[in-house]
Structures are given as structure tokens and as C-alpha cells.
Amino acid sequence: MELLIRSTFVDNMIFAYFLGMCSYLAVSKKVNTALGLGLAVVFVLTLTVPLNWLINEYVLRPGALSWISPDFATVDLSFLTFIVFIAVISGFVQLIEMVIERFSPALYAALGIFLPLIAVNCSILGASLFMIGRSYDFGNSIIFGFGSGLGWLLAIVALAAIREKMKYSNVPAPLRGLGITFILVGLMSLGFLGFMGMKI
Amino acid sequence: MSTQTAEVVKTEKSEPLFSKKNKKLLTDPLDSNNPITVQVLGICSALAVTVQVKPAIFMALGVTFVTTFSNLFISLLRNTIPSRIRIIVQLSIVATWVIVVDQFLKAFAYDVSKQLSVFVGLIITNCIIMGRLEAFAMGNKPFPSILDGIGNGLGYGIILVVVSVVRELFGSGSILGFKLFEATGIPFQGNGLMMLPAGACIVLGIYIWIQRSINGYAEE
């Protein structure tokens, strides 16, 4: 529970690490589309982080292959981490896309265009790498994946809502669009700093 | 991910190696078509690694290296990649080069590699690289693709260095670890805001503002 709150608010993917900024800025013009992408991110993060945990634990970690035979105890495949993780993520995203298309056309219509975008969303790969760096166990990795996704969803919906309001403000012309969005994100991130050091 | 369509550059056989068009490929991304401030690609790492100048420079070099070589390889393979699985093919080529960079940093610049932590790995999902592969390397010959890769890597690097100079100077009062304010005797209290993620966003926002005022470019 503590980890859930920490990964959602304190270590928010966007405001503390800037992961997934590209799609964050590109898809935050409307609340509806932001919500769609946010839900897709939560979904993919919750599933890929534990999946990558299993792969890391049983294949990639130094000495991980010893469950096959003790001869492999010295094998260290951790230099393959990046390529395996990204392959898992992009393969998984395509798999999910096919499954959703087959079983729930309505959800596919809602998420459809966002799913391919997720493969290159840094927050997904970033969460998997953080999960290794902080040596979570399996249960924690599920919570961490879900919490990070939730934090991302929260951040993108909040920014989209602010940007919808911004349309009625008189912003200096060269600052319009990207410039003011950056400053907004900076201010929001300042707000989220308030969660830092919070104990539950 | 970039959604722009492939910009095909026609290169004729008799064209000199550094023709005007090719030079433009190299210089355009530095300013008027900058990957960060104009194409809005690869922002995650631009904000995260710019607390100090040194990691920012290493990051810029790493990204330039990866864009150049993955552009080259995708451009060589462009006619043989089936379009349905192109994203996985692109990602695995990029990941290969990122592993090279990561292992190199770990071997020769261990402290920098520690400081950059996951962000070296995240070069894989840096949208600049995927964006350039999709938009340029898939439709162009190897040589222009290399130039495009170098140009975009450097365009990214410029922003990184500018933002990190501002942040390090006003955040901790130093440049490349050299205490500028102490050395010149100016009393200076470090501004904690600049060290925070929020500072990076605001500095970048202002950079974009200035650049767009000069170039006269406005959205909508």
C-alpha cells in the first residue's frame, strides 16, 4: 500500500523522472484522448513490469540460469537486459492489440491508436529498469507497475484539463503551444513536490 | 513517435559529397527544425540528465552516436524490412547500439554511467531516434541518413548543453564542476529550484519562447 502511494504520487513518473514526456505532451490536448492513453499505459505497465521481473529473475540475472542446471550458475546475461526488455514490451503491446481487437472491438476503438505509441513510451521501459535497480520482489513489481501507471494517468488527465482551459487565455504568441506547456508542467511538478517525504 | 510523412531527399549521382542539400540536412536540426523544441521529440531524457553539464555532454554524444548508426543501418535495410514488423526491427537495431554505448560508458566513464543510471537504457525509447528512423531513414539513401542522424543528435545535444549550463550555473554555481562564483568572489546562494525537475521544464519552456520569438514561429 505504501509502495502504491509512493509510486503514484511521490515518485511520479512524469513529475519526478520525466518518463513518457513525448506522448505526455503530444496527447494532452483533450481530456478524452488523454484518458484513453492513460488507461492503456496503466494496463501495459501493470502487466509488463511483473513479466519483465520474471524474465530478469529466471533468465537475465547473474547466475539466474542455475535452475536449468548448476553448470549455468556463472552465466551472466545482464548485458542483454535492454534488448530483451524492449522486445518483451513491443511484442507484448502488439499481442495485447491483437487480443483486444479480437475480443473487444469497443475497447479497441477507444485504445486502438494509442497502443502502438506505448511501445516507445519511456515510462514503460523506465519502470522495468527501475524495478531492477531497486530490486523489488514479484508482488512489489505488480504494485509498482500499477502505481506508476496510475500516477501517469493522473498527470496526463490533469495536464489535459489545464490545457483545455488554456485555450481561453491570452498567451504571448511565441510562447503558445509547447512553450507554455513546459512551464505548466514545471509548475505542476512543483506542486507534486509537496508529496515528497510523505510517510504513510 | 513522429507522425510526419517521410521526407524524401532526391540525391543525384553527380552530386558532390557535401552539396547544399546535404549540408542543410546537417544544419537544419540545429535550429529551425530542432528535434526537441520544434519536433517535440525525446524530451524525457532532455529534462532528466541536465542537472549537470558533464553527464549532459556524454548523453548528447551517446545519442548522436546511436542516431547516426541506427539511421545508417535502417537505411541500408530499408528495402528488406516488412512494414508490419518494422517497429520491432527498428527497436532491436537501436537497442544493439544502445548496448554498445552503455557498455562503453561502464568501461571508460563509470561515474558518468552511474549518474545517468536508467537514462542510457532509455535512449532506446528516445523518440528522436524512432522518429528519425520512421521519417527519414526508411525513405532515404545511407549517406543523407548518416548526416540526418548526426544533425539531429547534435541538435538534441545543443539543447541539452544549454539547459544544463543554465541549471548547473544557477543551481550549484558551477560549470563542469568548476565553482565559477566562488572563484570570482561573487557571493552566490545556489538556487534549489534549478536542481529540481521543475526547473528543467521552466528553463526549456523559456528557451523555446526565445527561439520562437527569433524565428517568428508560432503554433496555431
Image (spheres, helix red, strand yellow):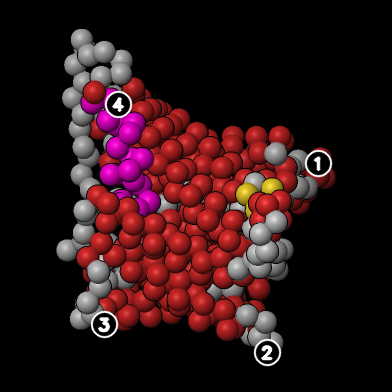
Image quadrant of residue B18?
Answer: top left
Q: Which residue is mark 3?
A: A165
Range drawn in magenta: B21-41
User: Does the magenta run of residues contain A100?
Assistant: no
Q: Quadrant of the C terminus of chain B?
A: bottom left
Callout 4: chain: B
Which element carries disc 2, helix, strand or loop? Answer: loop
Q: Amino acid at mark 4?
A: Lys
Q: x, y percentage for residue A182?
A: 39, 66
Q: Provide the residue designation for mark 2.
A: A200
Residue B23, labelled with which disc?
Answer: 4
Give the SS element for disc 1. Answer: helix
Q: CA distance from mark 4 to mark 1?
A: 51 Å
Say what amino acid the circle numbered 2 marks.
Answer: Ile
| Residue A103 seen from this side | no
Mark nearer the N terminus (1 vs 3): 1
